[in-house]
Image: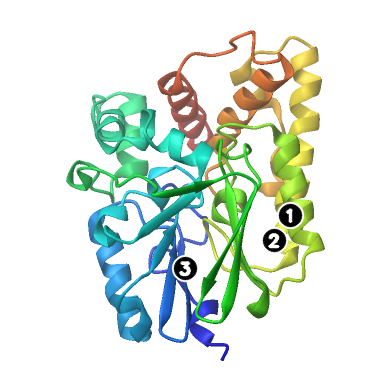
């Protein structure tokens, strides 16, 4: 029996602009079994989500497996609350989770360790103000990893996990439920907000969008923003194609990252939130254009400082 719950996504944190850290998670359930797709950015948010899921769907009382679509903390930091279940991720995601900002303590340092009277500190405080990274403690690692595709059953339903990264991160995975024509995309889709290219190449991301457009899908749950359909996929694909072309032109002209990020017109995307993310996207594209050899900017804190500057300048 096909159940409506599988089409239901937890959207308490939903912001129309798909802003920093406000991610979506989903529950797939059938015949008393359930699978969770992603957890949220801290334990409090994840616990509230689990409580609400359990009120709506008895099968959620015993979650059999968790899929982490990718390594970012807003999709993994709540894992501890479902410890003891299977954690499934791509191998690249599992590797990435154990590094850098996959570690909640490092994210806590980065988010809250900057003097809030500075432009960067004020920006970090603003975008991360709603989350408690220090309380996360640790993040249980994936127990099952795969490359390419993995098929699992939840009751009588099939869940096809399709690795499409590296793109947004190094190991992005889509979770497709063919019987329901539902897909959970993780951050391969941001709806009404600017997507972030952390890893690239952008070509893989565009291909993943094309795959979504080619599959028989009705309901698409993005990593951030409201539930969408194929028009949402087409919008993200169009955005990526556009910024890749615009960034290439400026790279060839020798323009720097910040200058290019300021120069690329985002008029067609003025209704999307977090426009300063263009800094991260230009940096990732420049790195790709240079074959990854020529560092065009420093580590993430430098890029966050550029985003803070762009964010502040656009407000003035
Ligand atoms: Zn996310």
Q: Nearer the viewer, residue 6 or 273?
A: 6
Residue 190 at least partly seen:
no
Mark 3: secondary structure: strand
Q: Quadrant of residue 299?
A: top left
How crowded pointer 2 is (Cα within 10 Å; few <14, some 14-19, many 20+) is rated as: many
Picture coordinates of residue 236, whole percent (x, y):
70, 50
Q: Residue at x 26, y 54 (%)?
A: 80
Out of 97 and 123, give the one closest to the viewer. 97
Q: Nearer the viewer, residue 136 or 119?
A: 136
Label 1 packing within 10 angstroms: few (<14), some (14-19), many (20+): some
Ranked by sequence position, the earlier of labels 3 and 2 is: 3
Q: Earlier in the sequence, mark 1 or mark 3?
A: 3
Name above or below for residue 158 compared with residue 170: below
Mark 3 or 2: the one toward you: 3
| Residue at 73%, 54% in the rendered image | 235
User: In the structure shown, which secondary structural element does the residue marked by tag 1 occupy?
Assistant: helix
Quarter of the figure that contains the N terminus = bottom right
Residue 177 image point, x, y percent: 62, 71
Q: Position of residue 23 (x, y in %)?
A: 44, 56
Real-space Cα distance between discs 1 and 3?
22 Å
Q: Identify the residue under disc 1.
A: 235
Quick check: 300 above or below 35? above
Q: How is the image coloured?
A: rainbow
Residue 247: percent from the left, percent from the top?
74, 26
Which mark is on residue 26? 3
Q: Quadrant of residue 65?
A: bottom left
Residue at left 44%, top 27%? 304
Which residue is label 2 attached to?
232
Report the side of 134 relative to 173 (left or right).
left
């Amino acid at each position: 029996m096909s159940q409506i719950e599988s089409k239901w996504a937890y959207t308490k944190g939903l912001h129309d602009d798909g802003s920093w850290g406000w991610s979506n998670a989903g529950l797939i359930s059938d015949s008393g079994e359930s699978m969770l797709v992603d957890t949220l950015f801290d334990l409090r948010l994840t616990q509230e989500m689990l409580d609400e899921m359990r009120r709506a769907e008895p099968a959620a009382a015993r979650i059999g497996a968790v899929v982490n679509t990718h390594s970012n903390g807003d999709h993994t930091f709540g894992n501890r609350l479902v410890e003891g279940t299977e954690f499934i991720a791509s191998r690249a995601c599992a590797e990435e989770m154990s590094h850098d900002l996959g570690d909640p303590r490092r994210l806590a340092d980065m988010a809250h360790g900057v003097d809030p009277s500075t432009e960067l500190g004020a920006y970090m405080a603003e975008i991360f103000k709603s989350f408690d990274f220090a309380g996360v403690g640790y993040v249980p690692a994936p127990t099952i990893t795969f490359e390419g595709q993995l098929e699992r059953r939840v009751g009588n339903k099939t869940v096809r996990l399709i690795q499409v990264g590296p793109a947004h991160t190094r190991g992005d995975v889509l979770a497709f439920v063919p019987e329901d024509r539902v897909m959970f995309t993780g951050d391969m889709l941001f709806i009404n907000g600017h997507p972030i290219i952390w890893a690239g190449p952008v070509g893989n991301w565009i291909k993943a969008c094309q795959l979504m457009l080619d599959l028989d899908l009705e309901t698409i749950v993005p990593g951030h923003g409201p539930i969408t359909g194929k028009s949402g996929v087409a919008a993200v694909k169009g955005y990526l194609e556009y910024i890749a072309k615009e960034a290439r032109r400026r790279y060839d002209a020798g323009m720097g990252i910040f200058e290019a990020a300021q120069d690329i017109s985002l008029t067609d995307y003025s209704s999307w939130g977090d426009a300063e993310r263009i800094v991260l996207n230009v940096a990732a594209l420049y790195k790709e254009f240079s074959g990854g050899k020529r560092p065009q900017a420093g580590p993430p804190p430098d890029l966050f400082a550029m985003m803070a500057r762009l964010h502040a300048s656009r407000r003035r």
